[in-house]
Image: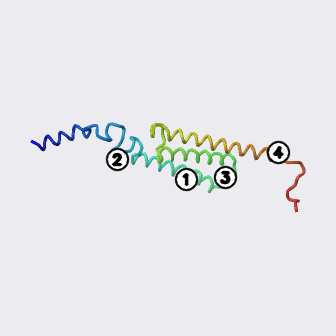
Amino acid sequence: MSTHAHSDHHADHGHGSHGAHGGHGHDDHGHPAGAHGTFGSYMIGFVLSVILTVIPFWLVMNGTLDNTTTTVVILALAVVQIIVHMVYFLHMNGRVEGGWSMLAMIFTIIVVVIMFAGSLWVMYHLNTNMMPGHDMSKMP
């Protein structure tokens, strides 16, 4: 009888159905729910990554890279592949870590776009505002 009372004692201290991980949206290893993908989601990400790699490779190998439209298509496929990697392999969505990882990624993208656009703007205006007739190749 003392053994049965002893096991009931442990069940009353939070080790029951709402254990340390079960009732708080965590998996069996203590990680947040949804933080890990399933085999199927990894396979979907892998297949999409292969497709998004083969298409630009095929475009380049066929010599269609000279076309400006093809270059834009390749860049667009690269952006799509980045998104596929973030969603299927890095598991970035609005639910993981309370949305903070997605917010950090959006902030990073905004900073990179501002830096890239600002750098292009500065380089363009430096080129157009150079002194006329100034030829750097004739310098000693």
The local secondary structure at tag 1 comes to helix
Q: Is residue 52 above or below residue 106?
A: below
Residue type at mark 4?
Thr
Q: Alpha carbon of mark 1 to alpha carbon of mark 3: how far?
A: 14 Å
| Mark 4 or mark 1, earlier in chain | 1
Q: Residue at x 66, y 41 (%)?
A: 114
Residue type at mark 1?
Val
Q: Where's residue 131, x and y in %?
A: 87, 48
Q: Nearer the viewer, mark 3 or mark 4?
A: 4
Query: Would you call the spot at circle 4 few (<14 residues within 10 Å), some (14-19), or many (20 or more)?
Result: few
Q: Quadrant of residue 1?
A: top left
Q: Check disc 2 and report the residue beneath it.
A: 29
Q: Residue at x 53, y 44 (%)?
A: 83
Who is closer to the viewer here, 99 or 3?
3
| Mark 3 or mark 2, earlier in chain | 2
For this orientation, the residue located farthest to the bottom is 140
Q: Nearer the viewer, mark 4 or mark 1?
A: 4
Who is closer to the viewer here, 36 or 68?
36
| Mark 2 or mark 4, earlier in chain | 2
Who is closer to the viewer here, 98 or 3?
3
Q: Alpha carbon of mark 1 to alpha carbon of mark 2: how far?
A: 37 Å
Q: Check disc 4 and report the residue beneath it.
A: 128
Q: Check disc 3 and report the residue beneath it.
A: 65
Query: Would you call the spot at circle 2 few (<14 residues within 10 Å), some (14-19), or many (20 or more)?
Result: few
